[in-house]
Amino acid sequence: MSTDKNLFEDANNERGGICTEYEVLAAPTHPDAAKALAFWQARPADGILIGRDLPSRAIASLLSHVIVHEPINGGNDLKVRLAGTAVRRRFGRDITGSTLSELFPATSFPYRLRSVMSAIETGEPQFADCQLSNGNLDLLHSQLLIMPVLAADRVTKWAMTVVFFFN
């Protein structure tokens, strides 16, 4: 997997100056990512099924960091079906029910959508590093582990993102 690094000014920030750096990674480096990746690697033959395999005791300590995405509009956007409480740290609110296009500016939305849809379409996890900064001040640094999952109907392909914070 090639590394793809993108820098965006956050157009949704009224004060301006907030930048988002989004980098696709070949593998996660956050220490807690190994636990979530091991969960995905040990998945049943038919995949991770929402309601059967998730929530799971194996990753109980990470459940507050989970976001479950459902593709909508033919895969041109994603609806957040579930967002753990730790995700509020990034957005300042519960994002359950929001769409990806509502959460991110048009400059970064396509890259984030592509990462999630790639996990869904290829059946392989995707990894990304995200940094929010204001000039030389780092505001928030996180990594994403994006894994394909199945909705409770056992057919519809969704994605589960686990957000790991560094600071």
Image (spheres, rainbow, N blue to C red):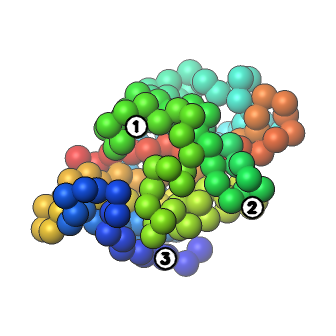
Left or right for 64, reference 115:
left
The reply to whether callout 1 and callout 3 are in contact (CB within 8 Å) is no
- Label 3 sits on residue: 4
Q: What residue is rendered at 64% in x and 27% in y? A: 54
| Residue 110 in picture, x, y percent from top left | 56, 67
**What separation in Å lies between label 1 and label 3 (alpha carbons)?**
24 Å
Q: Amino acid at mark 2?
A: Thr
- Can residue 38 be seen here? The reply is no
Q: Are marks 1 and 2 in contact (CB under 8 Å)?
A: no
Q: Earlier in the sequence, mark 1 or mark 3?
A: 3
Closer-to-camera residue (145/115): 115
User: In terms of image quadrants, where is residue 75?
Assistant: bottom right
How far is mark 1 from mark 2, CA to CA?
A: 25 Å
The tag on residue 35 is none
Instruction: Check disc 2 and report the residue beneath it.
Output: 122
Viewer-nearest of labels 1 and 2? Answer: 1
Q: Is residue 49 above or below residue 25?
A: above
In the displayed structure, 96 sits above or below 123; it is: above
Which residue is painted at 48% across and 76% down in the image?
4
Which residue of the protein is positioned furthest toward the left in this rendering? 136
The image quarter in which residue 131 lies = bottom left
State the image coordinates of residue 36 (x, y, percent, origin top left). 53, 41
Q: Secondary structure at mark 2?
A: helix
The 10 Å Cα crowd at callout 2, few under 14, some 14 to 19, many 20 or more, is few
Residue linked to disc 1 = 87
Label total for image? 3
Earlier-in-chain disc, 3 versus 2: 3
- In the image as oriented, which residue stretches furthest toward the front? 14
